[in-house]
Amino acid sequence: SNRQAQLAQVRVMRASGAMELSRRVLVACVCAVACARMFGALGRHPCCNAAFLSPAGAGPPDSRLLRTSCSQQASASLNSWPPFAASVSLVAIGAAALARGAGRLAGRPSWDVAKNLTQRGAAPSGPFPELCVFDLDACLWDKEMYEMRAIPVEDSKVFGDLSGRGEGVVGVMSGSDKISLHEGALLALQGHADGKLPGMRIAVASSADTPFAERVGRAALALLEVVPGLTVWDLLLRDWDGADVNQIGRQPPLSSNKAQTHFPRLRQATGVRFDRMLFFDDCNWGDHIGMVSAGCKESNGRGVVGVRTPYGLRKGEWLQGLDLYARKESNMA
């Protein structure tokens, strides 16, 4: 069928992306081990630091020598360390390299910023963006729509606690998969529903791979609740007097490039300038944040403020985005 052919094509594209990601991660892991050893982060092993220390006054080591030393030292460390210690070290370093080596954290504020905002329970104080745009898959919620097998229906609702706001629809089933909002996404939507972010409205921009994936996404939006009795779709339409300004899919006139299609169409449909927008996207299969930030600017040179959410929209990243936007506005005042 057409849908099976489309899914097969998507899987080939995803596999190619995964292979490139694996290559980058391997390189990043080797370099991460070497850099950590340079700072003595992996313990006082006899060969720690030796290959990386420059003679006094010589300045930083040559980058070509550093890359060569990285491979040599990483190999030597694995041969000489106890297997358990080496495994634990590489698992920890590999996790960090996975994010950084693939470019997921490029251009993001320090993790410490998000951690501090979360720990002190920072309440957003504004100024707030006029339009907050959310990606769907692996950002607003935890699943990829192209992987789903069935369109969610009324009988597929999963009920539970909506972050202390009462019992509501916390998930919807698509076959054996449950689609649920991420913690930060629910926090953001509840704050908006409660009027805690004055002047801000919301929309979604998703490059869902196939028409079927788009149908799954729209059905999930219409069933998942923000507070009991109010769905995500209700909230999206409420902001625009019932009009659907959301850009979901990649079928014409949309495409896989959100900077070229989704955001120009959002600007036209909403009347909100690019420099008044805040955008969240996982960027796991393409740097939409980078492309939109670079390609969607006003004549003053200012554009969309973006935050990457490689692990889904969490509370820290939501607060981080609001803080980024507020600081940008303060700097321009």
Image: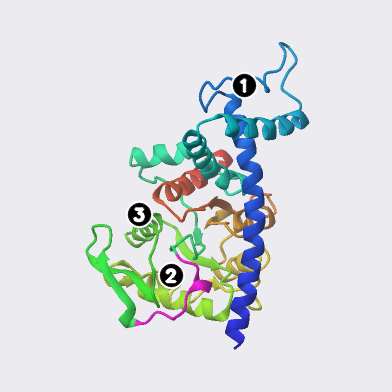
Q: Is residue 252 above or below residue 2?
A: above
Please give the label number shown on residue 196: 3
Expressed as whole percent of the image width and height from the top left, the position of residue 42 reads 52, 28
Q: Quadrant of the C terminus?
A: top right
Q: Secondary structure at mark 2?
A: helix
Q: Is residue 120 above or below residue 204?
A: above
Residue 111 seen by the camera: yes
The residue lying toward the viewer, choosing from 162 and 277, is 162
Cβ atoms under marks 3 and 1 closer than 8 Å: no
Residue at 46%, 63% in the rendered image: 202
Rounded to the nearest angstrom, the CA distance separating label 3 from label 1 is: 51 Å
Q: Secondary structure at mark 1?
A: loop
Point out the tag, 3 or 1, that comes first from the N-terminus: 1
- To which residue does mark 1 refer? 49
Residue at 37%, 82% in the rendered image: 153
Type of the residue with mark 3? Lys
Type of the residue with mark 1? Asn
Point out the tag, 2 or 3, that comes first from the N-terminus: 3
Tell me which segment is drawn in magenta: 143-153
Mark 2 or 3: the one toward you: 2
Residue at 48%, 60% in the rendered image: 139
Expressed as whole percent of the image width and height from the top left, the position of residue 268 reads 61, 69
Point out the tag, 1 or 2, that comes first from the N-terminus: 1
Please give the label number shown on residue 236: 2
Q: Is residue 80 left or right of residue 315?
A: right
